[in-house]
Amino acid sequence: MAILEILKIPDARLKQISEPVAQFDDALHAFIADLEETRQMGPAAVGIAAPQVGYFQRIVILDCSQTRKPVPNHGHLILINPEITHWDGFELGREGCLSVPDYTGNVIRAARITLVAQDPQGDRHEYEMKDFEARALQHEVDHLDGLLFLDRVVSRRTDLFQRKVYQKGANKKRKAANKAH
Ligand code: NI
């Protein structure tokens, strides 16, 4: 297993559209193991998509079971060729991303979705998702289509937030920068 390098903005490869997975073989399973190890590195991300490590195939790992709020979720999921087949309702919520380390942003997403995806063996499953898990899934599927949450914030001026940096001396400078917008 290996920890893979995460592509970060402004890397143009993050805009690339990923291809469907066609082979459910040992190479796919080895890649999934690496992607999972990468997801768990540092503060574990709730989700990661293959193109974030420069592998342009439609693969997502999602695990909303470790989030602070106990919300309905399906636990740890490996989703191959995920397709959202139904959207319902909408909600505004805050998102972050391993590929956008310095910012979080408010994004409108469907509140409830139906998802069809294959598992690592190629078998198809359907999932009903809502709230946080539905949001996280939509964020990850966006990665497969070359989109970041930055592309979906309504206003970069009012809905984008700089992450706090806990470095001595950096805070004062950052506060000044925030005021300046
Ligand atoms: Ni992301």
Image: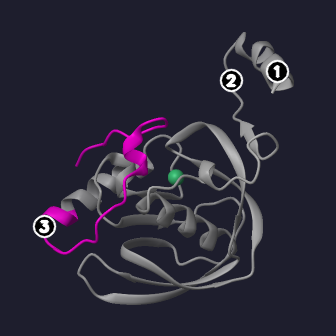
Q: Residue at x 82, y 43 (%)?
A: 158
Marks 3 and 2 close (CB-CB < 8 Å): no
| Residue farthest along the top direction in this orientation | 169
Residue 169 screen position, x and y as percent? 72, 9
**Three-letter amino acid code of the residue under disc 1:** Lys
Left or right: 175 with respect to 169? right
**Residues in magenta?**
1-29
Q: Position of residue 56 (x, y in %)?
A: 29, 57
Residue 9 vs 135, above or below: the answer is above
Answer above or below: position of 163 versus 70.
above
Query: How far is mark 1 from mark 2, CA to CA?
Result: 12 Å
Q: Which residue is label 2 attached to? A: 166
Numbered tag placed on residue 175 in the rendering: 1
Disc nearer the start of the sequence (3/2) = 3
Cα separation between marks 3 and 2: 42 Å
**Horizontal and vertical percent for residue 88?**
69, 84
- Lateral position of residue 109 relative to residue 42, left or right: right
Q: Which residue is mark 3?
A: 26
Label located before the other in sequence (1 or 2): 2
Reply above or below: 80 against 55: below
Q: Nearer the viewer, residue 43 or 53?
A: 53
Q: What's the residue type where badge 3 is placed?
A: Asp
Neighbours of disc 1 within 10 Å: few (<14), some (14-19), many (20+): few
